Image (cartoon, helix red, strand yellow):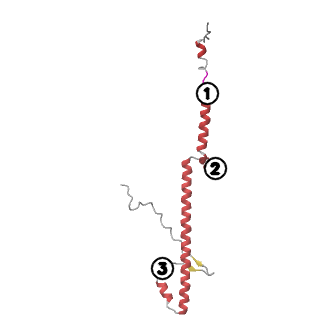
């Protein structure tokens, strides 16, 4: 009984080595990197639609300036509201003092000597004119609490 053995030539064993997957791997790698980069840059693309194509640091500078302007506008608005409220309170106090002066005659000088009155006046049309705009209070810088130190 003879068994037949199949003889393989050594060069036939090397045929699979000659095929390289390098080109296919590079293409897949480039596609994968592109998808990963695009997926992690969605917020940057959204910023580009608002601010134009700029670097992230330039966009952050623009945002910082916008936030500073919003805070400044809020501070101005609060200061104007406070001045208007003070003017209204003073006008009411003057009206009460005038009414009391008509009745008793002694409350008006006491209110004028108080010194807490501002320069709000009543205009010709009867509306209260707020005092001149006072400068805004300075911004508070960050301060550490009593229990926090840099040491």
Q: Position of residue 145 (x, y in %)?
A: 41, 61
The residue pinned by badge 1 equals 23
CA separation, marks 2 and 3? Answer: 53 Å
Give the Cα distance between marks 1 and 3: 85 Å
What is the C-alpha distance between the residues marked 2 and 1? 36 Å
**Which residue is under mark 3?**
116
In the image, is residue 73 above or below residue 13? Answer: below
Task: State the residue position of label 2.
Answer: 49
Of labels 1 and 3, the one closer to you: 1
Question: Who is closer to the viewer here, 148 or 125?
Answer: 148
Residue at image x 46%, y 63%?
140
Residue at the image point whose x is 55% and y is 67% from the top:
76
Q: Secondary structure at mark 2?
A: helix
Q: Could you say whether the residue bearing mark 3 is in a helix, strand or loop? A: loop
* Residue at x 53%, y 80% (from the top left corner): 90
The percent coordinates of residue 144 (x first, y second) are: 41, 60
Secondary-structure class at tag 1:
helix
Q: Position of residue 72 (x, y in %)?
A: 54, 63
């Amino acid at each position: 009984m003879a068994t037949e053995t199949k003889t393989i030539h050594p060069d036939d064993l090397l045929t699979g080595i000659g095929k390289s997957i390098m080109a296919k791997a590079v293409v897949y790698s480039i596609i994968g990197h592109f998808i990963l980069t695009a997926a992690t840059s969605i917020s940057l693309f959204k910023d580009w639609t608002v601010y134009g194509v700029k670097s992230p640091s330039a966009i952050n500078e623009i945002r910082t300036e916008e936030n500073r302007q919003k805070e400044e506008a809020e501070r101005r608005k609060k200061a104007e509201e406070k001045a208007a409220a003070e003017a209204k309170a003073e006008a009411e106090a003057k009206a009460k003092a005038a009414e009391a002066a008509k009745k008793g005659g002694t409350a008006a000088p006491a209110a004028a000597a108080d010194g807490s009155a501002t320069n709000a006046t009543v205009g010709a049309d009867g509306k209260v004119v707020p005092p001149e705009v006072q400068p805004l209070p300075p911004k508070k810088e960050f301060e550490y609490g009593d229990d926090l130190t840099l040491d």
